[in-house]
Image: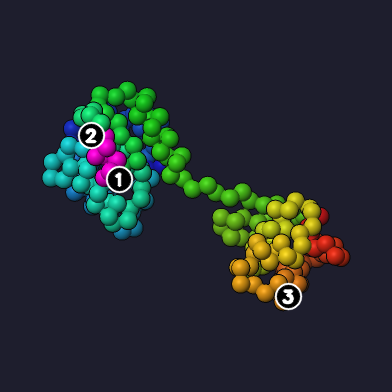
């Protein structure tokens, strides 16, 4: 997790960087808001996962920096630091687009706890890899393997196979597959599901692993 610390006080920057590095984070520091915007906007650089932003900085303060980031569509989590502890100050920080607000002075343990919480919140949930009968389907990477062999699938084939694997050995009807893998405009009287199943069987290869339950549906035992 890469964190950028922005504070015009060099002692505070060094202290925060040292504590966060001990916690295992990759950190960088800058002294003002303009440097933040430059760092965030660098093409080809490592993406930031979190920004710790002091409110009172020269050249460009934290509130305006946060506003400009949000206006530019940057949605990285922002933890705002400030010596001001009035409710109106906290509201101003949140209104500017900050995700959390920590008044100075603060305990370093509280800072690291808030950083960890924002890090968990910012990471999108990764769907679990599905495995059954020698098939491995990774929804995140959109990859399928059969006994270690890569299986190229179309979008519909991938969606149908994912539903069959999620069923955990039980049969899935054609109607259920239409509902899950096709949009609402799909014609329930077409042979789309049957044709997709036939293609899946061919691509998955031998021994056959995709079975038909007459009058019920399809399953992977």
Residue, disc 1: 97
Q: Are marks 3 and 2 in contact (CB under 8 Å)?
A: no
Q: What element carries label 1?
A: loop
Q: Is residue 59 above or below residue 189?
A: above
Label 2 Cα crowd, 10 Å radius (few <14 / some 14-19 / many 20+): few
- Judge from the rendering whether residue 71 lies leftward or rightward of residue 145; answer left or right: left
Q: How far apart are marks 1 and 3 (CA)?
A: 50 Å
Q: Which of marks 3 and 2 is nearer the N terminus?
A: 2
Looking at the image, which residue is at 32% across and 23% down?
107
Residue, disc 3: 189
Q: How many numbered marks have been drawn onto this rendered protein structure?
A: 3
Residue, disc 2: 88
Mark number displayed over residue 191: none
Q: Quadrant location of the C terminus? A: bottom right
Q: Is residue 79 visible?
A: yes
Residue nearer the viewer, 8 or 70: 70
Looking at the image, which residue is at 40% across and 38% down?
118
Residue nearer the viewer, 34 or 167: 167
Write the start and end of the magenta stretch as one range: 89-96
The furthest residue to the right: 214
* Quarter of image, res 82: top left
């Amino acid at each position: 997790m890469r964190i950028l610390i922005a504070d015009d006080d060099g002692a505070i920057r060094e202290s925060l960087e040292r504590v966060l590095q001990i916690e295992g984070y990759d950190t960088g520091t800058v002294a003002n808001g303009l440097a933040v915007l430059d760092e965030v906007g660098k093409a080809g650089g490592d993406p930031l996962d979190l920004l710790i932003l002091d409110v009172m900085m020269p050249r460009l303060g934290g509130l305006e920096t946060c506003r400009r980031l949000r206006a530019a569509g940057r949605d990285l989590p922002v933890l705002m630091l400030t010596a001001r502890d009035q409710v109106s100050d906290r509201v101003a920080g949140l209104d500017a687009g900050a995700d959390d607000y920590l008044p100075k002075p603060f305990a370093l343990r509280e800072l690291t706890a808030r950083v960890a919480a924002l890090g968990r919140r910012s990471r999108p949930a990764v769907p679990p890899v599905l495995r059954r009968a020698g098939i491995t389907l990774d929804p995140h990477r959109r990859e399928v393997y059969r006994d270690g062999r890569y299986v190229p699938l179309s979008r519909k084939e991938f969606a149908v196979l994912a539903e069959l694997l999620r069923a955990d050995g039980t049969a899935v009807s054609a109607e259920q597959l239409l509902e899950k893998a096709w949009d609402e405009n799909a014609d329930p009287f077409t042979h789309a599901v049957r044709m997709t199943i036939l293609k899946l069987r061919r691509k998955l290869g031998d021994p056959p692993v995709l079975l038909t339950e007459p009058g019920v549906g399809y399953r992977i035992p």
